[in-house]
Image: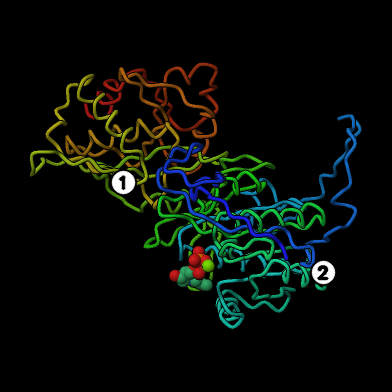
């Protein structure tokens, strides 16, 4: 009989302590310690190749010049957005964690990927839905005559490994990691120690067999992946599936990627028949309008390596209450307040008694500072009630003294704006150096101060 042992775990970062603590010494959060019973490993429970020599094998150091790897080890899926976010396809033996709010479409995305890999044996393990439910969803998505996909509704990792040994799948999807439990650990599924143990077991399987494993993870109310932070450290890639549930657009974002850029982005549209890839995002991020409206501007921004044009809308109105309201959707409110202070102090606009609302189209969250100039112009356009032409776009950062700062990859932004038929783009004059203006059809307007932009646009 194994001896039971219990320990206290911080539910937010996974820090382990022998006694209860009020404040976590690792992540400084309060009241997060919960007692979890850990049972000593029982040798009668089968593990992923338990006791096989490969786990005990000790590695020898090898010279870096002698280590070889093949480029072909990536599995390319028919979904181009998915490939891009992963850095060019699925890497053999990699472990990918996909997080997202409930109902955003994580299960739909992974089932769609699983059904779209003809000729590849895929095992979809669900601890959340019955096989009939999954079949119903699969029928909604498409006809899957060519798919070689198996569904397993199971939550015990030991039973899962037994089935994996029999089936020998080439790709494994787990929906979700929080529903699994390992017999090595006594605590309930979803607890820190269970999530950590199940992930460790699956990780060992992935690395030893070379089979890619996808884990779907729940997220907590503040948007973090539920369970210990260590989970994100263990896996190779962390993807975040996000979007507004009331909008049809979904964004798949790489948060961490050991095999590619962590700033890549994939855009999907949720339809009645599953998720559709959106290959030209600018089309959906720009609303169709013929006449210019005040408070609307377009910026040429970059998400990962992909340039896209996105619409910013601002509304400035007289505040009905004592404290003016400032609210921004898809843009950092602190940054908006900073830009408002710049406009107030440097350009003399009286905005302190005004309500300011800002909205980025399509439910996208923008972090690229190149959107600053478009935000500032949208606010002033609404404040003065003077529209900006529909063929004008912006790509520059605004500094604290109202100076227009340079942004990276400006050529790519200009080329995208030109491709989409824009006639004028405002950039920083520091970006103009070394730029071959003659090769573009679009008019490039270099500027140094925000006042200069307002003067050029509104007179
Ligand atoms: P789901 O994949 O179950 O979300 P998660 O696993 O992240 O919790 O997504 C469910 C939502 O997607 C649900 O509200 C219905 C919608 N949906 C569609 O609009 N079209 C479809 O083809 C499918 C399968 C789901
Ligand atoms: Mg689900």
Quadrant of the rendered structure where residue 325 is? top left
Q: Mark 1 sits on what residue? A: 359
Q: Toward the viewer: 402 or 221?
A: 221
**Residue 271 visible in image:** no
Q: Mark 2 sits on what residue? A: 165
* Residue at the image position 25 percent from the left and 43 percent from the top: 327
Label 1 CB sits under 8 Å from any ligand 1 atom? no
Q: Residues within 10 Å of mark 2 (few under 14, many from 20)?
A: few
**Residue 216 visible in image:** yes
Q: Toward the viewer: 220 or 80?
A: 220
| Chosen colour scheme | rainbow
- Residue 306: percent from the left, percent from the top? 55, 41
- Residue 124: percent from the left, percent from the top? 67, 69
Please state, as top left, top right, bottom left or bottom right, where the C terminus lies in the image: top left
Which one is earlier in the sequence, the residue at label 2 or at label 1? 2
User: Residue 7 — which label?
Assistant: none
Residue at far bottom of view: 132
Eye-nearest disc, 2 or 1: 2
* Residue at the image position 68 percent from the left and 75 percent from the top: 152
Q: Toward the viewer: 35 or 353?
A: 35
């Amino acid at each position: 009989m194994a001896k039971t042992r219990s320990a206290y775990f911080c539910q937010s970062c996974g820090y382990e302590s022998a006694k209860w603590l009020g404040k976590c010494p690792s992540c400084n959060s309060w009241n997060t310690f919960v007692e979890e019973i850990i049972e000593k490993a029982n040798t009668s429970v089968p593990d992923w190749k338990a006791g096989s020599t490969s786990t005990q094998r000790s590695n020898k150091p090898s010279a870096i010049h002698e280590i070889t790897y093949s480029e072909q080890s990536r599995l390319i899926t028919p979904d181009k957005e998915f490939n891009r976010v992963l850095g060019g396809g699925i890497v053999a033996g990699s472990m990918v964690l996909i997080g997202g709010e409930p109902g955003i479409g994580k299960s739909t995305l992974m089932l769609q990927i699983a059904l779209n890999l003809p000729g590849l044996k895929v095992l979809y393990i669900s601890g959340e839905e019955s096989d009939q439910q999954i079949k119903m969803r699969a029928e909604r998505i498409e006809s899957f005559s060519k798919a070689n996909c198996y569904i397993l509704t199971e939550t015990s990792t030991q039973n899962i490994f037994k089935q994996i040994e029999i089936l020998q799948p080439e790709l494994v999807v787990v929906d979700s990691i929080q529903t699994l439990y390992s017999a090595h650990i006594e605590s309930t599924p979803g607890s820190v120690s269970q999530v950590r143990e199940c992930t460790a077991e699956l990780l060992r399987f992935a690395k030893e067999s070379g089979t890619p494993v996808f884990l779907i993870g729940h997220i907590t109310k503040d948007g973090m992946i539920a369970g210990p932070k260590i989970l994100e450290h263990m896996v190779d890639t962390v993807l975040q599936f996000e979007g507004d549930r009331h909008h049809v657009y979904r964004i798949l974002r790489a948060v961490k990627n050991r095999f590619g850029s962590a700033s890549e982005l994939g855009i999907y549209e949720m339809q009645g028949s599953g998720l559709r890839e959106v290959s030209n995002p600018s089309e959906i991020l720009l609303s169709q309008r013929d006449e210019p409206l005040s408070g609307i501007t377009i910026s040429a921004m970059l998400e990962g390596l992909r340039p896209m044009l996105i619409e910013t809308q601002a509304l400035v109105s007289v505040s009905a209450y004592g404290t003016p309201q400032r609210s921004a959707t898809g843009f950092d409110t602190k940054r908006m307040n900073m830009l408002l202070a710049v406009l107030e102090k440097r350009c003399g606009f009286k905005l302190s008694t005004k309500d300011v609302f800002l909205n980025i189209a399509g439910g996208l969250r923008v972090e690229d500072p190149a959107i600053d100039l478009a935000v500032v112009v949208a606010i002033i356009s609404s404040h003065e009630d003077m529209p900006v032409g529909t063929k004008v776009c912006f790509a520059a950062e605004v500094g604290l003294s109202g100076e227009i700062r340079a942004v990276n990859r400006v050529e790519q932004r200009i080329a995208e704006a030109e491709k989409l038929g824009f006639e004028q783009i405002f950039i920083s004059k520091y970006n103009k150096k070394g730029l071959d203006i003659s090769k573009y059809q679009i008019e490039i307007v270099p500027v140094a101060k925000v006042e200069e932009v307002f003067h050029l646009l509104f007179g």
